[in-house]
Image: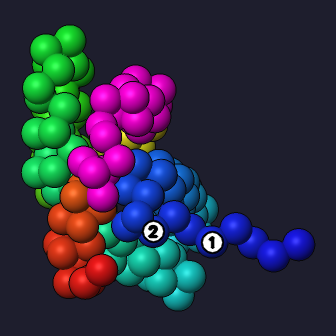
Amino acid sequence: MLPTPAPGFDEPLAMLRACHERIQRQCATLAKLAAHLRSEGLTDGARQAAADIHRYFSSAGRQHHADEEQDLFPELRTEPALSGLLDTLAREHAVMESLWQRLEPLLAAPDTIHDLDAFARSAGEFNTLYRQHIARENSELLPQAEQLLSVEQQRELGARMAARRGVSL
């Protein structure tokens, strides 16, 4: 059986869900990296993992948050019942960004990870918040978006997401 292709910009809500899966895989790698540094030290594999995590959250992770904050959330702001959820999710994005600012320079230069306990704590906080955040978006936000956004709104959402990445449809 052939693997199912990843959703494209013509399915923006499914694409956001798929991105959540990739984020969770990167978070799992971050947790493994923290444990590996304690047990094995900074090996070539650890350097590569740090580089991969850094690259993902510095590019695709940032684009994902922009997709939500600049495109999806404003579309849903017309629904007053979602106001509190959207505010909570936006605040969580800000906290995740703050946590990322602690991790980013260490992952960019893993030789500078000297306090393994502090690194593991920061990685754990980042992962815990992301896990909770993704669960909320997948169980509350995206199902509501599927109900509220018309086919045309979803098409426009996908087009804006593509444009952010320099992809023309």
Specify the segment rendered in magenta: 134-155
In-front residue for pair 34/78 = 78
Of the pair 159 and 107, the residue shown nearer to us: 159
Residue sitting at x 24%, y 48%: 153
Q: Is residue 41 above or below residue 70?
A: below
Q: Quadrant of the N terminus?
A: bottom right
Give the residue pinned by disc 2.
8
Q: Residue at x 30, y 80 (%)?
A: 169
The front one of 26 and 32 is 26
The answer to the question of whether label 1 and label 2 lie on touching residues, with beta carbons closer than 8 A, is: yes
Residue 120 is situated, as x and y percent measured from the top left of the image, at: 40, 49
37 or 153: which is nearer to us?
153
Q: Amino acid at mark 1?
A: Pro
Residue 152, numbered circle: none
Task: Tell which residue pokes out farthest to the right in this image.
Answer: 1
> Which residue position holds label 1?
5
Residue 143 lies left or right of residue 167; in this view the side is right
The dominant secondary structure in magenta is helix
Q: Quadrant of residue 61?
A: bottom left
